[in-house]
Amino acid sequence: MLAYKVKLALAASALTFGLPAGAQVVSGGTEGGVSGEDVSASTCGYGSTDGSGTTVGGCADAEARNGGTAETSTRAKANERRAMQRSDARARDDDERARSRTRTVVRNGEVVRSRTMSMYKMKGERPVREVVSTKATPEGTKTRKKPKGD
């Protein structure tokens, strides 16, 4: 039996303010995932702002085989100043677990921050983790990645 779920979410907030002179589009996001023999999980998140509005969205995907379970969730919300999005994907069977989660926050006209954490664990072994973070501003984008393992 194969358990498989995919979800997508998109929220946008458009403001009625005029676009300031010299406004720049700021966009960014992260993605990540893990997989094993019978389980896999991945998520993504992205967003952008131009000073007159924000856009945010994401995705979640999980798969489990051999009687395992898979769960996904995505949610997004926005107002005049900020848009937020969160995606979560989990898959497990008797001896493996996989999880990925992404959180993206967009501040109107300022910054797009996104962070993805992915984890895989096999029964009797230590978990393997990976964290990717980005911060996008009008001055540029910075990415930080913590390697797999501890």
Image (cartoon, helix red, strand yellow):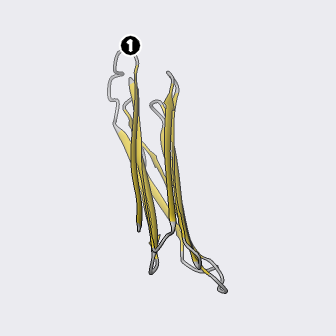
**x and y, in percent, of residue 93 in the image:** 55, 72
Residue 51, placed above or below residue 147: above
Q: Residue 129, percent across and down?
A: 58, 73
* Mark 1 residue element: loop
Residue drawn at 51 percent across, 23 percent down:
79
Q: Quadrant of the N terminus?
A: bottom left
**Mark 1 surroundings: few (<14), some (14-19) or many (≥20) residues within 10 A:** few
Q: In the image, residue 4 lies at what x, y percent? A: 40, 59
The residue lying furthest to the top in this view is 16
Q: Which residue is mark 1?
A: 16
Q: Quadrant of residue 10?
A: top left
Q: Left of 53 or right of it: where is 68?
A: right
Identify the residue at image location x=47%, y=57%. 142
User: Hey, which residue is sitting farthest bottom in the picture?
Assistant: 124
Q: Is residue 41 above or below residue 104?
A: below
Q: Residue at x 44, y 31 (%)?
A: 109
Q: Toward the viewer: 59 or 15? A: 59
Under mark 1, the amino acid is Thr
Could you tell me if residue 47 is visible in this image? Answer: no
97 above or below 115?
below
Quadrant holding the C terminus = bottom right
Q: Is residue 60 visible?
A: yes
Residue 47, picture quadrant: top left
